[in-house]
Image (spheres, grey):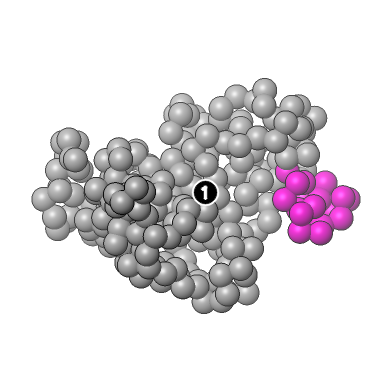
Amino acid sequence: MDILPMQAKGIESRRRGQVLVGPIDLDLGSEGITVIIGPNGAGKTTLLQLLHGTARLSAGTVEWACSASEARHHQSFVFQRPVMLRRTVMENLIYPLRLRGVTVADAQTLAREWATRVGLDSMLDRAAPVLSGGEQQKLALARALITKPKLLFLDEPCAALDGRATREIEAILTQAAAEGTRLVLSTHNLGQARRLASEVVFLRAGRIQESGPANEFFSQPTTPEARAFLRGDIVE
């Protein structure tokens, strides 16, 4: 089932009459890694939630290459602070598979495979809430990817991690993209954006200030705000 391309048309999020995000028009193609950057408070998290459907649209539409319910079924979302079930690593990994009707035996086999891929194979019986921050983020990623989603949203996936954990997470993301999962992630880390992005969306004050191929954006940004942001200046 192809869920992409996706078109967001005039989407907005409003709260108490105040526009938090939008109006925004955004197209997502079938391949690559889209990285959303921008100053704190720009609306990056809200935009991800609007696209994923976990935040209510105040205006506009999100159109998929299939029905909205089918598109949702083939998506996953990884939060900035990993949400862990108060269960073992194994039980966290098999949970989304069991929801989809996968047998216990097959789910456990896949869980072991993914635990090995993300370096948690020695921790399958450990309680997930006692893992380190990096280990929890790797578990959250494995749990999101174990269902082979067509599209994965990630909100600041490395925000609280050290350099080693960040490298490990980025390697997992790069491999997932190479295997066909479309990635859309936000980050405050410009180095990470340069390493991962095939496309950049620069968000400012809830609006898209500039977007385009990553190599063009980083080498020749077209707006003064984007140039200032890349220099490290304060952009509001």
Residue range of the region highlighted in magenta in the rendering? 93-110
User: Residue 7: x and y, percent?
Assistant: 41, 71
User: Residue 173: x and y, percent?
Assistant: 52, 48
> Callout 1, which amino acid?
Leu
Q: For numbered disc 1, what is the local secondary structure?
A: helix
Is disc 1 surrounded by few (<14), some (14 to 19) or many (20+) residues within 10 Å? many
Q: In the displayed structure, does residue 160 sit left or right of residue 22?
A: right
User: Based on the displayed image, in which of its 4 quarters is residue 201 positioned?
Assistant: bottom left
Is residue 36 something that shows in the picture?
A: no
Q: Nearer the viewer, residue 40 or 35?
A: 40
Magenta-drawn stretch contains 54: no
Q: In the displayed structure, does residue 227 sit left or right of residue 208?
A: left
Please tell me which residue is depicted at 48% across the width and 53% down the height of the picture: 55
Is residue 127 something that shows in the picture?
A: yes
| 165 shown above or below 20 | above
Please tell me which residue is depicted at 56% across the width and 76% down the height of the picture: 66
Q: In the displayed structure, does residue 178 sit left or right of residue 186?
A: right
Residue at numbered disc 1: 173
User: Residue 195: x and y, percent?
Assistant: 37, 46
| 129 shown above or below 68 | above
Please tell me which residue is depicted at 18% across the width and 40% down the height of the picture: 235
